[in-house]
């Protein structure tokens, strides 16, 4: 009997209800199961994975003499062309405040940093501190204001016009209800749990504290996420990566086990070994436990097959020795056989004291 890995799993695993939480991805399910058995570290992406994909604008700060409406108008005009979760939240805030966005020129999304565009003939920049530093923008005291907001787990988006920051939007990410339970369950299995994100270190630390994560890999550009995973692997860790976005795809492929959030992007799902069908992070420890259970069942199955084969061989050996006796009996004749038996009986009696 030969069952392919995935069929074997679905035949042997009793709690089939869990199979409706997860589905297999790019690698052979049996290979994934074997790898999970040895995993030691679980890395979560932040935005859209540990936190809800829809952040909310909580504060709008402006430079002296600047109108809040003007900052919101600039931000919504630039973000109108972006698909980032932060952009969607800023657009929503603009809608609530009845802001009419202006058309922009030369829009460019800067992965892991923000976006740039030309608005009313002026060069505008919108994004994180890293982007402002990279483009040598004058911070105008907004870096200090951002520090306070970041310690409240808020993400700060700076709005700059003509190389000078003129406003700041703070957005709060709400951790998913299932995040804390999933992290504590994974830690209970003795796994190291980390978070990786392009967001600011302070903000990330506050989110990590809220969900119980000890290690944060912050301000990692999307292209560098895979390198961070390789770094962990070089330290001897067997790494599982959980992510949702296009920018997580290289890290999902590099990790020993890639786990995608079903509500995330198709690219992330394509790059992963497992997809969580529901947007419930508790499915991560469930998938791991299921793999442990599968390995136990496979071991039992292999032991059973070996036992059956050994017994079969023994039965065949016994049958062939019975056949040999019968052949001897027929070849040398029944009388001689009886004679042989008698003489061996005499010999053994003589040996008795
Ligand atoms: P994560 O790694 O958490 O999934 P991203 O790599 O998508 O996050 O983004 C990292 C950071 O880049 C964000 O926290 C934000 O500061 C900045 N950023 C990226 N895109 C935008 C955007 N369209 N608007 C504002 N900020 C952005
Ligand atoms: Mg993400």
Image: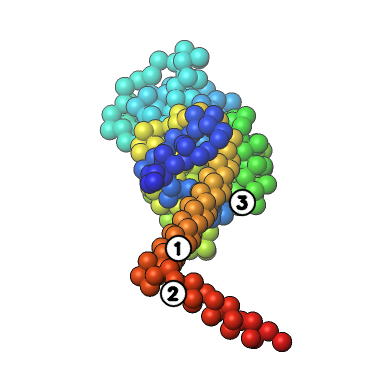
Q: In this view, does 122 lie above or below 331?
A: above
Tell me if mark 2 has few (under 14), some (14-19) or many (20+) residues whose alpha carbon lies within 10 angstroms of its own: few
Tell me if mark 3 has few (under 14), some (14-19) or many (20+) residues whose alpha carbon lies within 10 angstroms of its own: some
Tell me if residue 87 can be seen.
yes
| Front of the two marks 2 and 1 | 2
Of 66 and 346, the residue lying toward us: 346
- Image disc number at residue 336: 2
Which residue: 55% across, 50% down?
Answer: 300
**Which residue is at the far left?**
106
Q: Is residue 14 left or right of residue 180?
A: left
Quadrant of res 275: top left
Percent position (x, y) of residue 285? 58, 41
Disc 3 on helix, strand or loop?
Answer: loop
Residue annotated with mark 1 = 322
Residue annotated with mark 3 = 191
Precedes in sequence: disc 2 or disc 1: 1
Which residue: 28% across, 33% down?
Answer: 106
Give the image's coloring scheme.
rainbow
Label 2 to label 1: alpha-carbon separation: 18 Å
Which residue: 35% across, 39% down?
Answer: 270
| Front of the two marks 1 and 3 | 1
């Amino acid at each position: 009997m030969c069952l392919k890995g995935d069929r074997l799993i679905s035949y042997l695993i009793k709690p089939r209800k869990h199979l409706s939480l997860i589905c297999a991805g790019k690698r052979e399910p049996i290979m994934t199961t074997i790898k999970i058995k040895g995993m030691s570290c679980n890395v979560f992406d932040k935005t859209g994975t540990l936190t809800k994909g829809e952040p909310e604008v909580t504060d709008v700060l402006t430079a002296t003499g600047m109108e809040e409406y003007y900052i919101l108008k600039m931000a919504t005009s630039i973000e109108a062309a972006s698909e980032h979760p932060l952009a969607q939240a800023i657009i929503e805030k603009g809608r609530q405040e009845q802001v009419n966005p202006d058309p922009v020129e030369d829009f460019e999304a800067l992965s892991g940093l923000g976006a740039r565009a030309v608005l009313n003939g002026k060069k505008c920049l919108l994004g994180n501190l890293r982007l402002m530093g990279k483009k040598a923008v004058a911070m105008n005291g907004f870096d200090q204001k951002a520090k306070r907001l970041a310690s409240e787990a808020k993400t700060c988006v700076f709005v700059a016009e003509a190389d000078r920051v003129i406003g700041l939007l703070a957005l709060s990410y709400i951790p998913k209800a299932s995040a804390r339970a999933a992290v504590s369950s994974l830690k209970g299995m003795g796994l190291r749990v980390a978070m990786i994100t392009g967001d600011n270190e302070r903000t990330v630390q506050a989110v990590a504290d809220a969900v119980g994560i000890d290690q944060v890999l912050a301000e990692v550009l999307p292209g560098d996420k895979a390198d961070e995973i390789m770094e962990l692997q070089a330290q001897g860790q067997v790494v599982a990566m959980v992510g949702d976005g296009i920018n997580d795809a290289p890290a999902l492929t590099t990790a020993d086990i890639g786990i995608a959030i079903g509500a995330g992007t198709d690219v992330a799902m394509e790059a992963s070994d497992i997809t969580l069908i529901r947007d419930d992070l508790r499915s991560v420890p469930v998938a791991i436990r299921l793999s442990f259970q599968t390995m136990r069942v496979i071991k039992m199955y292999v032991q059973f097959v070996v036992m059956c084969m050994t017994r079969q061989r023994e039965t065949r050996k016994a049958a062939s020795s019975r056949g040999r006796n019968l052949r001897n009996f027929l070849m040398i004749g029944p009388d001689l056989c009886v004679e042989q038996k008698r003489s061996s009986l005499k010999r053994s009696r003589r040996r008795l004291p």
